[in-house]
Every structure is written in C-alpha cells, then in structure tokens.
Image: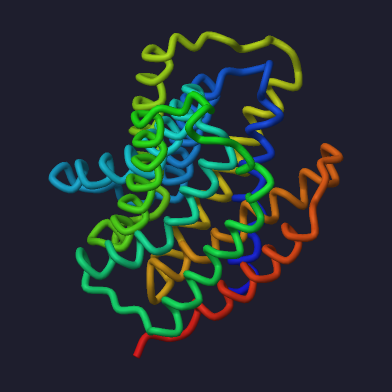
C-alpha cells in the first residue's frame, strides 16, 4: 500500500510539470477535454473486456457528479482563475487548504473521524507547503491585478476538489472502479468542453509532442494518477489520509522543475519540503 501512495504522489506531481509542457502547444481545457474523453473511453473498454457491471440508471447521477467535481470543475476553475491572472504560487497556496477542507467535509458529510495528531500533522504539512511556494508569493496582491472574483474562482476549485474527494467515499465506492471512472471521465470531458467554449480556447498544434502529451495525460495522469487516487480513497480509512499525501505533490514538482527546467530551489523551499514530509507522516496517525 505504501508503494501505491508513493506512486500516486509521483504521478500527481507530474501533472504540474505537464501543465508547463503543454504551454504553446495545446490550450489547457482543450487538453483536458481530450484527455478526459479518451480516458473515459479507455476505462469503458476495460470494463467491457473484463465484463464489469456498470452502475444502474438511478445511481448514474452520483457518478456524473463525482466526475464533474473531481475532473472538469476542479481543473477547469483552476485554469480559469490562472487565465484571469491568479499567480500559480497563490493557486498552490490555496491548494494547501485541501486536506483541512476534506477533513472537515468528511466529518460533516460521512461522519469520518481524524485523530488530534492527524489534524496537527495536516496543519504542519500545510505550513511546509507555504514555505515551498513562498518564492512565488513575493508580490503585492493590491497591485497584481488579481480581483476578488479570481480569488473566489481559485478557492472554488479547491472546494469542488475537496467535495469530489469526499464524495468518492460515499455509496459510489461500492461500484466497480473501472465502470465508475468511465462515467466520471466522460462527465468531466463535457465540463472541460464547456470551459473551452467559455474561454474561447482553440489551440492544438499538430506535431508529435502534442500527441505524446495527450497520450501521457490519458494513460499516466488519468489512467494512473486518478485511478490510484480513487482506488486508495476506497481502501483508506480516511479521505483526509489520501488528501494529506497530495501535499507532497507541489514540493516534489518543484524538485522535478529543478532538474527539468533548471529552476532554482532556495533553502527555505528545501526546509519546507522536509517540514511537509514530517507533517504528512504525522497526519497518517490513526483516528481514536
């Protein structure tokens, strides 16, 4: 199980890197709509080959809601916020709130309990992540052109992701994972397509790099990362346990950017990474 958590964090961190690679080649929501559509068809094909049951009609809306929340709305709102001028560092900082939100929502919606040590660990991890993204926060918010609406969009993205994560622990967790993810990805593709028209995105450069990035998104990010996240959410004791692990993704992405894009890492970022690891480790404490 520990190996699967490590693999999840590694793949999730690569999502940040992929976002840099597609710049100038594919518009974000064009990329997401294609990725989710093809991933949905892939999971549907796997379910059919393995003869896995699909959800009954009355259960279908729940899977559609889960897909809209975790896929289309989360990434769509995040990209809209960034497109409207929200700095990536601020977006990462807002994202640090996710484990705390998941802990609260899981308690309110599904009566899931977390130990005091686990809660403390989450906040320590959040503090570490703040240190990691701190170099990107050296700006005057008052003069940065970031509107209240843009901040609301960024916060809404993290809220819908937290709702989506918590929703995966409800009754849909008993359904077949392949057929469920087929429906979720197809639903997410429709939401992303809506953002394509809303933002007027059109860019898709017809060259081999674009197709490699699309294949990477389908088979690795969706077929691997999202699949692992849903699988671990179903098997874990607490939704917050998986969510806290994802605090490690932005710091790991910073390390990957250091090697791939020669981006510098400051001492405070390295210290923040260590603190985040310590906080996540502490957050895995069992609930009383």
Please say if 235 is above or below 95: below
- Image x and y of residue 59, in percent: 18, 48
Please say if 172 is above or below 115: above
Please say if 71 is above or below 79: below
Based on the displayed image, in which of its 4 quarters is residue 189 positioned? top left
Based on the displayed image, in which of its 4 quarters is residue 89 positioned? top right
Please say if 282 is above or below 256: below
| Residue sitting at x 64%, y 58% | 131
Total label count? 0
Q: Position of 134 compared to 91: left or right?
A: right
- The N terminus lies in which quarter of the figure? bottom right
- The C terminus lies in which quarter of the figure? bottom left
> Which residue of the protein is positioned furthest toward the bottom in this rendering?
288
| Residue sitting at x 61%, y 74% | 2
Based on the displayed image, in which of its 4 quarters is residue 115 positioned? bottom left
| Residue sitting at x 35%, y 19% | 194
- Image x and y of residue 237, in percent: 39, 76
| Residue sitting at x 33%, y 50% | 164
Depth check, front residue: 45 or 202: 202
- Image x and y of residue 33, in percent: 46, 25
> Which residue of the protein is positioned furthest toward the left in this rendering?
58
Depth check, front residue: 116 or 285: 116
- Image x and y of residue 177, in percent: 40, 54
């Amino acid at each position: 199980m520990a190996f699967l958590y490590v693999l999840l964090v590694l793949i999730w961190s690569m999502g940040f890197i992929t976002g840099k690679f597609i710049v100038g080649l594919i518009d974000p929501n064009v990329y997401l709509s294609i990725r989710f559509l093809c991933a949905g068809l892939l999971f549907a094909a796997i379910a059919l080959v393995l003869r896995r049951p699909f959800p009954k009609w009355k259960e279908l809306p729940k899977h559609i809601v889960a897909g809209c929340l975790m896929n289309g709305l989360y990434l769509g709102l995040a990209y809209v916020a960034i497109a409207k001028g929200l700095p990536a560092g601020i977006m990462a900082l807002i994202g640090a709130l996710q484990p705390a939100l998941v802990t609260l929502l899981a308690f309110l919606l599904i009566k899931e309990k977390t130990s005091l040590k686990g809660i403390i660990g989450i906040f320590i991890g959040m503090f570490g992540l703040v240190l990691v993204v701190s170099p990107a926060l050296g700006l005057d918010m008052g003069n940065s052109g970031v509107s209240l609406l843009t901040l609301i969009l960024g916060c809404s993205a993290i809220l819908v992701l937290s709702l989506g994560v918590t929703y995966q622990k409800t009754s849909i967790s008993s359904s077949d994972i392949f057929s469920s993810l087929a429906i979720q990805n197809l639903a997410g593709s429709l939401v992303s397509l809506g953002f394509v028209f809303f933002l007027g995105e059109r860019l898709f450069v017809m060259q081999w790099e674009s197709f490699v990035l699309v294949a990477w998104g389908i088979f690795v990010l969706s077929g691997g990362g999202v699949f692992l996240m849903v699988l671990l959410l179903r098997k874990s004791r607490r939704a917050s346990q998986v969510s806290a692990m994802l605090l490690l993704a932005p710091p790991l992405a910073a390390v990957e950017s250091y090697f791939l894009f020669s981006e510098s890492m400051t001492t405070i970022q390295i210290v923040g990474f260590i603190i985040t690891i310590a906080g996540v480790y502490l957050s895995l404490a069992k609930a009383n």
